[in-house]
Image (spheres, rainbow, N blue to C red):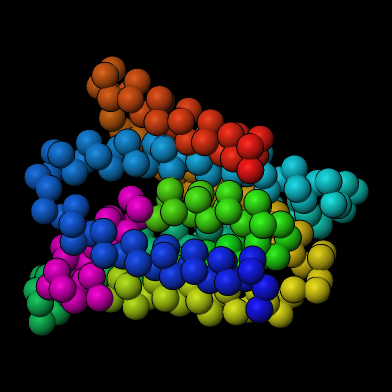
Amino acid sequence: MSYSIVVAFLGIIFVASLSFLGFLFFKLKQDALKKLLLVLVSFSAGALIGDVFFHLLPEVIEENPDNMWVWVSVILGLIVFFILEKIIHWRHCHIPTSKDHPHEFGIMNLIGDALHNFLDGLIIVGAFLIDFNLGIATILAVIAHEVPQKIGDFGILVYAGYSRLKAMILNFIFSLISILGGFLALFWINNELILSLLASFTAGSFVYIAVADLIPEIKKETSTKYSFIQLFSIIIGIIMMYLLKVFV
């Protein structure tokens, strides 16, 4: 197994371990947690956008300048993550939340998160198979996105009726599904076209997460002070990806 692949799977395991962050941040007061998440989400949006336009798309276009399927794959990434978000927000249970009967939205969140994690593993290993630096940039973008998401997932499961310990363990177990996605990517190790399409799919999914999910969330904050903090965080995320492109 090559060095790049080892690093890719270590990265996947590290991303899965972020599930335990929820327990730490859940101790914060609600106002402090909200302010911290706004900064993390803003930085995440910038990192995802920077990864798409400084790393993923330039790499794919350079290798496949006239391949229309590259752009079809970008669109597919947008559509798949739209469907995934619909699954995550599916609600249909009318029984009050309790430890004996966790709300269905907690279960659906786990199912949606499992698919998301599977795709994360596929995306991370696929990026490393194309180029080591692209893999590093992609895993940093995934980490930036996963930190606020894991904290949010933990809160959702606790609100749905799970104990804090069970919520943390379930979050971690479902995060490990990303390893399966990583192994699937290994089947395409010698197929440059499929790897390029996977990178394009990743670009589409990252654009959707940043523009349709994260940015609308931070727009809810109307305070001038925190709006500037959010803008600064987005710019820092973008700059980080640019510096990674230039110096790594």
User: Residue 195 location in percent, x, y?
Assistant: 74, 64
User: Residue 104 location in percent, x, y?
Assistant: 26, 73
| Residue shown at the point (34%, 78%) measured from the top left | 173
| Residue shown at the point (49%, 64%) measured from the top left | 11
Which quarter of the rendering shows the C terminus? top right
Main SS of residues in magenta: helix
| Residue shown at the point (21%, 71%) measured from the top left | 167
Q: Quadrant of residue 228?
A: top left
Q: Is residue 121 above or below residue 130?
A: below
Residue 41 among magenta residues? no
| Residue shown at the point (66%, 78%) measured from the top left | 1
- Which residue range is magenta in the image? 147-169
Q: Is residue 82 above or below residue 170?
A: above
Q: Residue furthest top?
A: 224
Give the side of residue 216 with respect to residue 92, left or right.
Answer: right
Give the side of residue 202 with respect to residue 26, left or right.
Answer: right
User: Residue 203 location in percent, x, y?
Assistant: 63, 50
User: Residue 236 location in percent, x, y?
Assistant: 46, 30
Give the side of residue 5 with respect to residue 139, left or right.
Answer: right
Total labels: the figure holds 0
Residue 148 among magenta residues? yes
Specify whether residue 77 is in view.
Answer: no
Q: Nearer the viewer, residue 57 or 90?
A: 57
Q: Nearer the viewer, residue 4 or 41?
A: 4
Specify whether residue 60 is in view.
Answer: yes
